[in-house]
Structure formats: C-alpha cells, structure tokens
C-alpha cells in the first residue's frame, strides 16, 4: 500500500502543469429545509436504544407536534475550479448541503442534483458563461 501511495504522488508530480484557479460561493436556500425538529414532549418514539431523543429526523411536514427546527440550514454553495491557461477545464469541486434522495422508482421525481449539476457543467464548458473574464 505504501508503494502505491508513493506511486500516486510521483504520478501526480509528473503531471504538474500551469493552471488558473477560481473560487467562490453562491447562496441557494430555496432548495433546503431543516430535516431535524424539536417535537412536542411525548411525541418522539424511543430510539433503537430505548431512549427518547430530543429531536426527530424527518417528522411529518406541517405536524402540530413540530416545535422548532433543531438547527440552521447551510444554503452556501462553495466551489473551486481549475483550468489550463488556454481555458480548458481541469477540474471543478463544489459543496452544497442538500440531502440526496436516491433509489426512487420509475417515473418518480428524484433529488438527483449531483447528476443534473454534472450535466449542466458539461453543457457550460464551451460557453462564455463558464469562462472567466481576464481582469
């Protein structure tokens, strides 16, 4: 294993090339909701260990037993993008605290924003919207 790790480091060093970096954030709270809620006393069932939790994960929306969200949401989308000096993309990394919902049945709606996001990035790579302006 140590040899493979060292090999990975050598290969990465051999592939070094000039790059430009961009980074930033955007806010998108419209896609989020708080999935953990403080509930009215006596309405949370025991957990698998027989104890009563103070909050419930994914309680019924609009329930009269909801007291208040158990914490804030994080609406920030953060990104780091690398490209070659000629503008050819190298990589993009983003982080967004949206809960993924997968494994849905046919003709159901999925929150597969990972796939949608990647497809949108591919479409944008050759457009002026994706390229940064030189200042």
Image (cartoon, helix red, strand yellow):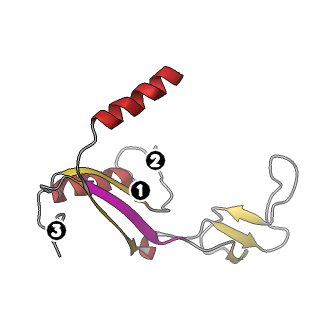
Q: Which residues are magenta?
A: 74-82
The tag on residue 40 is none
Q: Residue furthest right?
A: 50
Where does the image place residue 1, in percent across and percent down from the top left?
A: 53, 21
For residue 73, what is the image quadrant?
bottom right
**Considering the image in quadrants, where does the C terminus appear?**
bottom left
Q: Are marks 1 and 2 in contact (CB under 8 Å)?
A: yes
Q: Would you say 118 lies left or right of 33 here?
A: left
What residue is shown with label 1? 111
What residue is shown with label 2? 102
Q: Is residue 48 above or below residue 24?
A: above
Q: CA distance from mark 3 to mark 1?
A: 25 Å
Q: Mark 2 or mark 3: name the one nearer the start of the chain.
A: 2
Where does the image place residue 113, in percent across and percent down from the top left?
A: 37, 56
Residue at position x 41%, y 25% in the image: 7
Helix, strand or loop status at disc 3: loop
Q: Mark 1 or mark 2: name the one nearer the start of the chain.
A: 2
Residue at position x 33%, y 50% in the image: 115
For residue 38, what is the image quadrant?
bottom right
Q: Would you say 104 lies left or right of 39 here?
A: left
SS majority, magenta? strand
What residue is shown with label 3? 129
Front: mark 2 or 3: 3
Q: Are marks 3 and 1 in contact (CB under 8 Å)?
A: no
Q: Mark 3 or mark 1: name the one nearer the start of the chain.
A: 1
Give the number of callouts. Answer: 3
Helix, strand or loop status at disc 1: loop
Q: Would you say 68 lies left or right of 125 here?
A: right
């Amino acid at each position: 294993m140590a040899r493979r790790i060292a090999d990975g480091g050598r290969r990465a060093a051999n592939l070094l090339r000039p790059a430009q970096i961009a980074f930033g954030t955007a806010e998108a709270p419209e896609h989020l909701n708080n999935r953990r809620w403080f509930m009215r006393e006596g309405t949370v069932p025991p957990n698998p260990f027989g104890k009563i939790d103070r909050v419930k994960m994914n309680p019924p929306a609009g329930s009269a037993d909801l007291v208040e969200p158990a914490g804030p949401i994080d609406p920030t989308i953060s990104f780091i993008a690398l490209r070659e000096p000629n503008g050819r993309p190298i990589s993009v990394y983003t982080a967004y605290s949206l809960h993924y919902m997968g494994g849905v049945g046919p003709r159901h709606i999925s929150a597969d924003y990972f796939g949608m996001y990647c497809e949108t990035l591919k479409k944008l790579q050759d457009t002026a919207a994706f390229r940064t302006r030189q200042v």
